[in-house]
Image: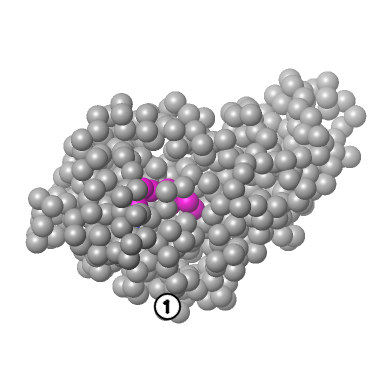
Amino acid sequence: MTIPVFPETVDSLWVDGRLATMTGPTRYGTVENGALAVVGGRIAWIGSQAGLPADAASRAGSIHHLENAWVTPGLIDCHTHLVYAGSRCAEFEMRLGGATYAQIARAGGGIMRTVTAVRAADEDALYRQSARRLKAMLAEGVTAVEIKSGYGLDTRNELKMLRVMRRLDHNFPTAVMPTFLGAHALPPEYSGRPEAYIDLVIDEMIPAVAAAGLATAVDAFCERIAFSPAQTERIFGAARARGLAVKLHAEQLSDSKGALLAARFNALSADHLEYLGDDGAAAMAEAGTVAVLLPGAFYFLGETRKPPVGLLRGHKVAMALATDCNPGTSPTTSPLLMMNMACVNFGLTPAEALAGFTVNAARALGMQNRWGTLAVGKQADFAVWDVDEPAELAYRMGGNPCRMTVIGGTVACA
Ligand code: DI6
Ligand code: FE
C-alpha cells in the first residue's frame, strides 16, 4: 500500500479506530490504531495513526474519537423490494399450515396481494411505510440500498413506486439505487397473455422509466412461476437499448438457466441462485456477474436447496449478500441477521459475509469505484460498531451494535 499524502487541511479527522477496510490481502484488511480523514465527502487519507503528521489535528475542521471501535465500510444492501404496502402475515400463517409459496402464488396470493395493496396506496402512504424500513436500515449501518419496483405492474403504479424511491433518496442520507422490475409477475389483467404484458413492459414502461430517469437498472423474475428465459431476453434487450444495466432473479426455485442468460448480457448480478449449475457459475465468472445470495428468503420459505457456495468460490464468482427486504419471502431490514444466516445456513465465513455487504455489494451495483471499501478516493461512508472483532457482526442473532452511520463524512445516524 502506498502511503497517501495528508492534505493541507481536511474537513474531518477520525482517530482511534480499528479499521476493517475490506481491501488488500488480509481477510478484513485490518488497520489497528487507524485513522482516516475526509475531504469533500471522500476519504482523503487512511492508515495507521502513527503515520499521521504531527499537526494533523490542527489541520482538521473536526476531530472524532472512535474509542477503539471497529469501523467498516458502510453496508450496502444490493437487492431489496423495500417499497411496498401492507404485509403478508396471513400467508405466513398459511405456509405454516402447509401451503407452499408457489401454491399461494398460483391461487392469486403472493406477489399479487402486494400489488393490490400498492395500487390502492397513494404515494404518500407508500412513502411513509417504506421510510420506516429505510430508517431501520440506516440505523444498522446501511449507507446505500438498491430498491426494486415490481408491485405496480402497470405503468402508472410502477412509476409511482419509482418516484417513492426518488423521494427516499432525496430525504434520507442513504443512497437509493432504483431498479425497474416490471417483469416481476404477470398482472391479472394480462392473465394468459404474457407476451402482451412483455410488450407493455418493453414498449411503454421501460421507455417511460428511462425518459424520467427513474431507474438505473432493469431486473426480471426468471422462473417457472414468473417469466421464461426467452421473455427475460426480450426485456434485457430493451433495457440495454436504453442504456440501463440489467440484473436477474435467477435459479431461485428451479434451474431455469437464467444465470447463463444474465451472464450473456453482462448483468451486474444474478440473484438467489439456489439451483445454479456449474455452467451458470462458469458463465458468471467469465462475465464478472456478481452472485447475490439471499439467505432471508431461503430461511423464510423453509427452502432446503442451498446456493452452491463451493461452486461459486471455485469459479471465483464474487458473492454479495442482501436482505431481499420484501413482504412475502424476506420481511427483514437487517443485514446483520442476513450475515448470520449466510454463515450458519450457507457456510460463508464471517469475512465473506461482511464482504458480501460491502465490497462485493458495491460491485453488484456497479458502484465499486465509489463504495464498498475504506480507501483513498472512496466516498466516506462507514459504520462504527461496538464489537470486539469484525466476525462478531455475523455472530450475533439480532440486536444492533451499530454506534453510528457516517455518510459522505457526516454522521447520518447515531
Ligand atoms: N423473488 C423474491 O424473493 C421476491 N421477488 C422475487 O422475485 C418475493 C416477492 C414477494 O413475494 O412479494
Ligand atoms: Fe427479490
Q: Which residues are magenta?
A: 322-328
Identify the residue at the far bottom of this view.
278
Q: Amino acid at mark 1?
A: Gly
Q: Which residue corresponds to the image point at 44% horizontal and 63% vertical from the top-left? A: 298
Q: Is residue 256 above or below residue 393?
A: below
- Position of 396 with respect to 196 (left or right) is right
- Callout 1: SS: loop
Q: Which residue corresponds to the image point at 50% horizontal and 73% vertical from the top-left? A: 308
- Residue 79, position in %: x, y? 43, 51
Res. 167 image quadrant = top left
Q: Residue under label 1, please give it.
A: 277
Q: Is residue 61 visible?
A: yes
Q: Is residue 408 above or below residue 369?
A: above
Q: Which quadrant of the figure contains the C terminus?
A: top right
- Position of 340 with respect to 221 (left or right) is right
Q: Nearer the viewer, residue 396 or 47?
A: 396
Q: Which residue corresponds to the image point at 47% horizontal and 51% vertical from the top-left? A: 323
In the rendered image, residue 324 lying in the magenta stretch gets the answer yes
